[in-house]
Image: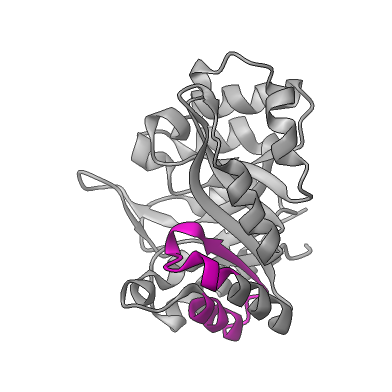
């Protein structure tokens, strides 16, 4: 089958970021490993005003496609987060194609969803939500409830299926994949060790999640990102190879 885009989330180089490297340096290193699509993490900016134009220049120089992971909620205390426009301005300045948020406190939202979200969706950037590691935004019920409301309102807002976040909320990633597959526009792939008191995110096949069976359920045409901490280029390349091999063997 046709290979989907395999992207790299900068979490792959978390150790190097913690050691002081900036996102531009990390993105350049991932580009050198062959990635043409890279997901920037907002929380990794140290001097955002300085780094945003540097990221944009790197993307232009290396012909990269950029996504933007924003650890912020769409809804705060039942109201649209007033910071969202700032985040979208940042995304536009970098030439971002996809921006990702968490749902937040949609349960207490009482307004008109279409009217409320339409300005956020008018920037020419694909907007998605992700299942995170919280009870409010990471369990199947609130994620499905929100996406059903988005669909009913005919809004162009999609979903990032994060394979490894389900164990953090004690839910089944296979069941979630079956329930949410129709909404998926991007996939975060990782593995988790779930035998301890708390899950630990690890590279593919070093945990106990059936990630291949989960991908079998999800769309085969959407981008797939490697998203787990490792500073080892060989481990990153192995993750790329595992995904390439999986999609080669998969049926359309």
- Work out whether residue 8 or residue 2 is closer to the camera in this orientation and state it: 8
Q: Is residue 7 left or right of residue 208?
A: right
Q: Residue furthest front?
A: 49
Q: Determine the residue located farthest toward the left in the rendered image.
A: 197
Q: In the rendered image, which quarter is residue 3 located in?
A: bottom right
The structure residue drawn at horizontal position 64% and vertical position 28%, both measured from the top left corner, is: 147
Answer with left or right where residue 190 lies relative to residue 16: right
Residue at 68% of width from left, 54% of height from top? 98
From the top left corner, tell me how far across and down residue 92 is, in percent. Answer: 70, 58
- Image coordinates for residue 212, horizontal then vertical, percent: 55, 54
Where residue 70 sits in the image (x, y, percent)? Answer: 52, 51
Q: Horizontal and vertical percent for residue 68?
A: 59, 57
Q: Is residue 153 magenta?
A: no
Q: Is residue 218 visible?
A: no
Image position of 157 (left or right of 167): right
Query: Where is 108 relative to 1, above or below?
Result: above
Residue at 53% over, 77% down? 24
Question: Is residue 48 shown left or right of residue 121?
Answer: left
Query: In the rendered image, which quarter is residue 67 located in?
Result: bottom right
Q: Which residues are magenta?
A: 24-52
Answer yes or no: is residue 75 visible. yes
38 or 90, which lies in front? 90
Along the viewing direction, whichever of 72 and 191 lies nearer the viewer: 72
Residue at x 37%, y 53% (from the top left corner): 192
């Amino acid at each position: 089958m046709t290979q989907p885009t395999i992207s790299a989330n900068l979490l792959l180089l978390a150790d190097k970021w913690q050691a002081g490297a900036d996102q531009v340096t990390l993105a350049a290193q991932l580009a050198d490993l062959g990635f043409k699509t890279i997901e920037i993490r907002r929380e990794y900016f140290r001097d955002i005003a300085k780094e945003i134009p540097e990221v944009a220049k790197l993307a232009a120089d290396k012909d990269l496609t950029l996504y933007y992971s924003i650890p912020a909620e769409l809804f705060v205390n039942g109201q649209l987060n007033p910071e969202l426009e700032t985040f979208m301005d940042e995304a536009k300045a970098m030439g971002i194609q996809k921006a990702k948020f968490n749902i937040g406190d949609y349960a207490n939202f009482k307004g008109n969803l279409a009217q409320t979200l339409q300005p956020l969706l008018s920037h020419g950037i694909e907007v998605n939500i992700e299942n995170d590691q919280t009870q409010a935004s990471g369990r199947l019920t609130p994620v499905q409830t929100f996406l059903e409301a988005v669909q009913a309102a005919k809004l162009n807002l999609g979903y990032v299926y994060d394979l490894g976040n389900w164990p953090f909320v004690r839910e089944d990633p296979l069941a979630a994949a079956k329930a949410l597959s129709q909404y998926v526009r991007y996939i975060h792939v990782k593995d988790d060790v779930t035998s301890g008191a708390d899950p630990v995110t690890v590279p593919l096949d070093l945990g106990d999640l059936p990630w291949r069976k989960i991908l079998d359920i999800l769309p085969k045409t959407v981008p797939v990102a490697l998203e787990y901490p490792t500073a080892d280029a060989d481990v990153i390349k192995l993750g790329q190879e595992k995904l390439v091999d999986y999609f080669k063997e998969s049926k359309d």
